Structures are given as C-alpha cells and as structure tokens.
Amino acid sequence: MTTYEQSVAPEVETDLRRRSIRLGDILFKGIAIAASLVATILLVWIAWKVLDLAWPAIQDFGLSFIWTEAWDPVTRDFGALIFIYGTVVTSLIALVIAAPLSIAIALFLTEIAPRRLAAPIATMVELLAAIPSVVLGLWGILVFGPWVRDHLEPWIQATPLGVLPIFSGEPSSSGIFTAALVLTIMIIPITSAICRELFIRVPQELKDGALALGSTRWEAIRGVVFTYAAPGIVAAVLLGLGRAFGEAIAVNQTIGNRNAIPTSWFEPGDSLGSKIASEYVGATSVEQASSILYLAAILMVISLATNVIAQFIVVRFERARRAV
Amino acid sequence: MRRLIVAAVALVALVALAAFAGRTDSASAKPSEPQQAGGSLVGTGATFPFPLISKWIPAVENALGIKITYTATGSGAGIAQITARTVDFGASDAPLTPDQLNACRGCVVIPWALAGMSVMYNLPGLSKRVVLSGPVLANIYLGNITTWNASAIRALNPGVSLPNTRISVVYRSDGSGSTYAFTDYLSAVSPQWKSRVGKGTSVNFPAGQGARGSSGVAGVVKSTEGALTYADAAYAIQNKISFALVKNRAGGNALPGIRGVTKALCDVPDKVTNLAQIKIVDPPAKCGKQAYPISTFTYVVVPTSSGDKAATLRRFIYWAVTAGQAPGLTKGTFFVKLPTNVNAFIYREIKRIQAGS
Amino acid sequence: MSQLTQADPYDITVKSNGLRRRRIVEKVFGLAAVGSALLACGILVVVLGTLVFKGFSALSVDFFTKPRPLFGEEGGIADALVGSALIVGMAMLMAIPLSVLVAIYISEYARPKVARSLKVVLDVLNGVPAIVVGIFVFGILVVGNGQSAVYGAFALAILMLPMVARSTQEILEVVPRSLRDASFALGVTKWRTTWNIVLPAAIGGILTGVVIAVARVAGETAPLLFTTSIAASVVSADVSQALPTLPVTIFIFSESPDPGEQAAAWAAALVLIAFVLAMNVLAKLFAGRKRRQLEGS
C-alpha cells in the first residue's frame, strides 16, 4: 500500500472528487476538440466557398474556360489559359533554378560548413524567407527588374541560348522571366530549410559506411543522402512549387500584367494570382467578376493539389521509414 | 512568463494610446457635437480625378465640416464598390452601362469634374513636344506601329529626329475610366480599333503591358525609355513627364490644358438632359484647332437611397460642382470648370439622392 | 610505381585517373554548394542593403507621425503603422488561443490516426494561398457589410492558425513524457497537467512559433487588399472601418512615379523589415530560453 492509496479519501469524498475531475477534463477536452473541428471546418469552408463563388462562371463557361486563351471584357470572352500559362511557367522556371540551389545550400549547411559557420548562414537563409513578398516586389520593380533588363537578359541573348524563341525579343524589366527570378528567391529558403532537416536526419553510420568503402564525399552524399531523403526532397520541392503557384503580390508587381501568352519569356504576361489581385476589386460586369472568381478557384485547386500530393509523399515516406 | 505578459499588455496599451493621441491630432478643430452638420463620407474609385479630390478634401472640411475619405482604386472598383454598397459614393470616369445601372439598383451618375487625358511618353533628348494623331495612336496601341521613327509618326513631326527606340505601350491593368475615355477616342478615330478591341473600362489590349492606377502607368513610363501611356494631365505635370500634342479633327495640334479642354466642349447642347450628350472625345472640326480630342468628364455615382448619408452627400456634391470648381482651388490640377450647360442636369440628379428605403 | 595510368589496380599508393576525376567532381560540387550558399546570402545582403540605402533618407520624425499624403503632398506612414499594429494585434488574439487548443488536442488527447489527419489538415490549410484566403473572407464577410479592420484581422488569423498550431504541437510533443507521468502520479488531473505543467514547460517554443507567425503575417498584403484597402488616410483606431496598413501602403507606393513616394515605399519597407527582423531575433531568444529550460529540467 503506497502513501498515495492510503491518502485517498473515503467513498463519498472520492465520488465527488472524481466527478469534478471528470468535469474539468471533459470540458477541457471538449474545448480542444471544438477548436480542432473549427480548424477542419475552416479548410472545408474555404474550399467550398471559393467554388461556390466561382459557380456562376463555371456554369456559364464550363470546363473549356481552362484552356480558352482569351480575356476580353468588352465581348465578355474569358478564359484561364493565359494565366495558367503564366502561373505554371513562372513557377516551373523558379523551381528549376531554386531546387538545385536549395539542395546545394542544404548540403553546404549539413555536410560542408563547419559548425560555427553553419548557424549564421542558416539564419541568413531563413531571413530570406522573412522578407515580405511586397518588399521583394518593390525591390523587383525598382532595382532588380531594371538590372535584369539592362544586364541579365542581354547577356542571355548573347549566349547560344539567345537563339531560342523564349529568349527572343527586347529585354524588359517586367515579364515572365523577372517574375520567375523573384519567385526563385522566395522558394529557396523554404525548400532548403526542409532539405536541411532531411539531411540532418540521415544516419551518420550510412554515410560513414560509404566513405569507408572508398567513395568520395560527393559520392557518399549522392548515394546515401539523396537516396535516403529522395521522397522528402520531392516533397520539399513540391511545397516550394505550391508556394510559387500561390504568390500573387510580388508577381503582380513584376510580371507586366498583359492579357496574352507571350512568345518570349522576356515579355510581359500575367498569372492567376496576379490577375486576381489586379482586377477583382474593379470588375465591371458580373461575367468578369465571376470569371475572376473562377480563376481563384483554379488557383486554389492547383495549389491544394500540389500541397496534398506533397503531404501524401511525406506520409508514405514516414510509413516506409517506420517499417524499416 | 508573467513579466512577458505584462510587457505585452504594456505594448498594446502604448499602441492604443498612440492611436488615440494621433486621432485627436489629425482631426481638425471641429466641435465634437456638430450643431451645424459635419458628417463623414467614404468613397472610392477613379484615379483620374484624384488630384482634384485631394484639393477638395481639406477645402470641404473647412467649408462644410464634412470629412471625406477617398481611396483611388480605379473606376471599375468605384462602380463595383458602390454597387455593393461598401462605400458612400463611387467615382468613375466612365458612365455606367445599362447592366451596371441595373446592378446598382437606382444610382445617379453626376458629372462633377472635367479634364484632359494626356498622352505621356518618355523620349529623352527631344527638343520639341511630339505630335501624335488619333489614327497613329490607334495603330500604336494595336501593335501596328512599333518604333518611334515609324513613317507615320515622322510625318506628323517634320524636322524632329525621332530615335529608333521601340515604343513600349503601357495601359491600365485595373478597371479604369481613363481606359474608357481613351478607348472611346480610339474607337471614334479608328474603325480597326473599334471592331477589334472596342471601348470599356477593361479591354483586351493587343499590345504592351499593364500597370495599376494612373500612378502606376506614369511610373512605368518614367522609368522606361520609349514608353507611352494615357493618364490625367495632372500626373504628367506632377511627375515632370512629357506629354504629346494630339492632332484634332480641325487639323490643329492640341494640348490637354484648360483651353484645350474648354474648346472641346463646343458641341455640348445648351441644356444637357442626359449623359449621352456630354461625350466630348474627338470633338468636331468646328470646335477649332485648339480643341483637345481626348477630354473627358468624370462622374460621382451615388445611390438614390442613401439612408442617413443622403443629406451630407447632397451638400458635398453641390459644393464640389460649385465652390469646388473655383479656379483658385483647382489651380495646378488642370481640371476645367464645369460648363453651365450641365448645371440643370446636375442639380436635378442631386435632388434624386434621398434617404429612401 | 610512379606511373599514373595503367597502374596496378591493387596498388593503393598510386592515384588512378578515375580517382582524380572523382576528386575533381567532388571539388566542383563542393564549390557549387559553397557558391549557392554565398549566392543566397548575397541576395539577402543586396535586398537589405538596397532598403537601407534608399529608404534611410526618407526616415524622419515627420515620416513616423504624419499620415499618408494626398496627391502631390508629403506625408508618412503613421496611419499605416497604427492600422497594422491594431490588425496584427487582433489577428493574434483571434488565432493564438484557437491554435494552442488545436495543438493541445493533437499532442495530448487525439488518437494517432486522428492526430495525423489533423496535422495534414493544418498543413494543407497552411498551403492555401493568401490571396484565396482574402477572397474567402471577402465573400463571407465584406460583401454586404463593407470593409473593416476586423475582417482584415480575421483573414490574417486564418493564415496564422496553421503556423502557430503546428509549431506549438511540435513543441508540446518534445516536452518529456516524464513530466506528465510525474504529474499524473501525484493525482493531478489531465487538464491541469496540460495547463499548469506542460504548457509552461513549452512556453519558450510556443512563443517562438507565435513570433515567427506574427512576422510572416505582418507582411501579408493579398488578404488585406480585399478586406481593408479602402481606408481614410488618417491615424485612426476605429477598427469597425477599414484601416490603412503598412504592406498595402508599400504596395501602392511601389508603383508610383513620384520619387518622393518611391522613397517613402523604401522607408516603409525598411520599417517593416526591421519589425520582421526584430521578431526573428525575439524568436531566437525564446528558443534559447526553451532549450535552457528543457535541458535544465
């Protein structure tokens, strides 16, 4: 018999105490459950409401809206293709540039940098994420855009890449390319932070084993770290892509806001988020307003899908890891 | 942890204090219980009249004690927000279409200012102002003319050595009454524009890039050599951006100044009874060589059932179309005093603003 | 055996061509990694440097005490500062209690399957673009009622919820089980254990997460465009109306041709970044405190 059991009060008092304990616990658990329900309902509600707002346009234009290349408020001819192109192309360009850079940065921080250097550099990369998108856009309009127009784009045109039609035409400070580069700056911190977490978790003995077998550091990384973290890297890249899809403000400031699919990436274009930000408050007809909401619904579906796929990969990854 | 909470509460209290202190500072010395009515109005809409409205805001507060809040978001937003009744008045350079009037459920559209739409450009090193014409502007905006030294432009500017720079066409990306006025003009002077693009607050511009607000398009032009755009003259003058002479039907090259816009009014009937009669883009040749072809009225849109804001709205708009037009007040904005032809129409429409149900 | 090619493959004292090539590859990738890190740091320095260089000259007492200017006048960001402070403050009040409760449920009460699903819900919510959240709040609140600072705060709270909930939940899970077990062994109820023992132990990490979320959300523009963008240019604490905010003000100024407004945009951006950086430093301080606490206990 322990002291605890001995100090338990007689029958009546015990019942009272148990009832008040149960009440407190039940209330608290109830509030916590309610909060969780609110969070879940919120997600569902957002998805439902945006689709509901877009429904008049979905009924009017049907699914062909998605591949219609038009945006004419005068003739009421609307389509999403121009903006889907802008969103997808700027995000993919950003991804192609940012993914290797992020992985390289994460590798640098986990494998190459001495401990004392890694912490401040990691902080600096995190701070890149902390820059608000409107500030990056401001910098993009006034500083980066002109630099791209005056130096980067002419330089690209001077290289063999310049013969490609996507790099043709006059350099411009606002356009698909400038917006894509700004998106790159936004994605890098997210993707590299996740990759860094992944690389840290790779068991040291696997790396040591590879080195013991005579591989160079790079081969050990390639063979062990990448293979081990591959699904996680894919998820990190997808999360970065989702972020790029959803970015509206910085893109709006740098993409040039033009209602056409540009032949050259140096030319202005427009993206889903950017178009919504430009026009929603000022839509002049019901068809235009609901078309913009249709664009919002498409954007929501694209970024949710990317996110859900990334989550799915993470969940499978965790399950496989636990099974090992 | 407790210390943290105390610090946080103190911080919030400090901010609140600053806010209240700030509010008393910014509120002018007017009585807290106004026996002569004060009141406040919130409005949004066109960027075109923003220079003039900026002059009105302090002046009407001094004269009538009415506090006006105005955010320039574009005519499209002005129409949309007043339709949704999220503001007390909307401002638009474009008259409402029948659909929009229906959606607005009984709104009056009152012209309350008048100015010229300047065609701004960035060509450093030119000694004279560039001369452009309606058909040339239409071709530029259609993408048919792409460089400044094209033959059509050189024909209008004899003796001026125009550079080979590409014309960067800039237009309004937001719903804009300036776009309406400009495309109205282009539709009048170019059948190709009329059939291919048309007019509206938002159109499918075939060439160029967009920017938001009169401020935004001015910004792009100022920073891009060879750029061209359309915006209220005050923006060009305020930001020291060159604007073009535009050839009118009489063959003269006109400026968007007070004289140019006043001359453009010559064809407005003596007693205006509806808005269609005050279209003044592309005025006929009889208006003379100084008539500026891209002039436009700008309107305030107010619901006929405005609840308890009705009286304040009537007072404000009446002030705006009378005292607000005084040359001493409008100096520097290049807005032209409203012609007397429209007075009867305006007063009739103001009377329609009632508390309603 | 000093010949480099066709050497005895079993002689490990001789460098073979293959090894040299592999070493070169390793050096190249090493340089690439270093270069990437330098590039990222370089971009940060360039952006921050530009902000300081261009914005510093516009900072003045006037800048902090005057509201947004009308056409052609000088002004400042006093109205935007107050508006942003109020809106972010309200968003914190709306989001933090709810987020902490969700985190408590996930880490203390929920069954593993439910916990995993909730985490996925939060992560997906985190991925909803800010502009879609803005449209959502516009659709359910602003339509028919007009804009207001409260609606803006609500939109920001929706953005904060998944961030704070997830970071709080992760911190709670790190609190040692022994703490809870000891508390239960002493007869303390579960809710009291969570409230009085676990939460205080995790407070450092929770505050870190909160502060990081506040820093993120203070710079969000898109949700505010739809909920609180048509606002008077006066310093006001009337949250039932729309209030000016720092990000929206920067957004508007950023497209202006007026060099005065551009300088104001840079200065306002500098103020915003200073706030964000201060929050990040604060977060690191809290994280350090948490680490010391958990290591000490």
Image: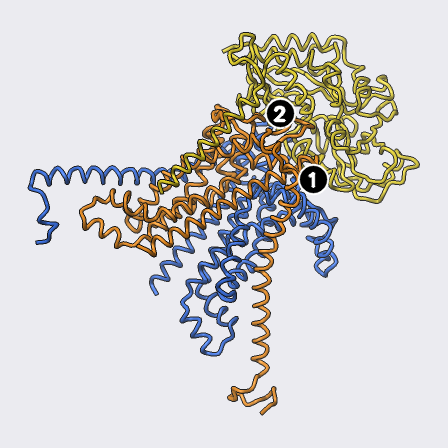
Chain colours: A blue, B yellow, C orange
Residue B102: x %, y % from top left? 57, 19
Q: Residue furthest bottom?
A: C1
Q: Residue furthest right?
A: B159
Q: Residues within 10 Å of mark 1 (few under 14, many from 20)?
A: many
Q: Residues within 10 Å of mark 2 (few under 14, many from 20)?
A: many
Residue C248: x %, y % from top left? 57, 35
Q: Is residue A167 above or below residue A290?
A: below
Q: Quadrant of the N terminus of chain A?
A: bottom left
Q: Quadrant of the C terminus of chain A?
A: bottom left
Q: Nearer the viewer, residue A262 or A108?
A: A108
Which label belongs to residue B45?
Answer: 2
Q: Chain of mark 1?
A: B
Residue drawn where x is 53% and y is 24% of the image: B23
Q: Chain of mark 2?
A: B
Q: Quick check: can you spot residue A82?
A: no
Q: Secondary structure at mark 2?
A: strand
Please check whether the numbered discs 1 and 2 fall on a single chain: yes
Q: Nearer the viewer, residue B9 or C184?
A: B9
Residue A194: x %, y % from top left? 47, 56
Q: Nearer the viewer, residue A295 or C106?
A: C106
Residue drawn where x is 31% and y is 37% of the image: A34
Specify the amino acid type for callout 1.
Gln
Q: Which residue is mark 1?
A: B209
Residue drawn where x is 74% and y is 38% of the image: B222
Residue B314: x %, y % from top left? 60, 11
Q: Quick check: can you spot residue C233?
A: yes
Which label belongs to residue A47?
Answer: none
Q: Secondary structure at mark 1?
A: strand
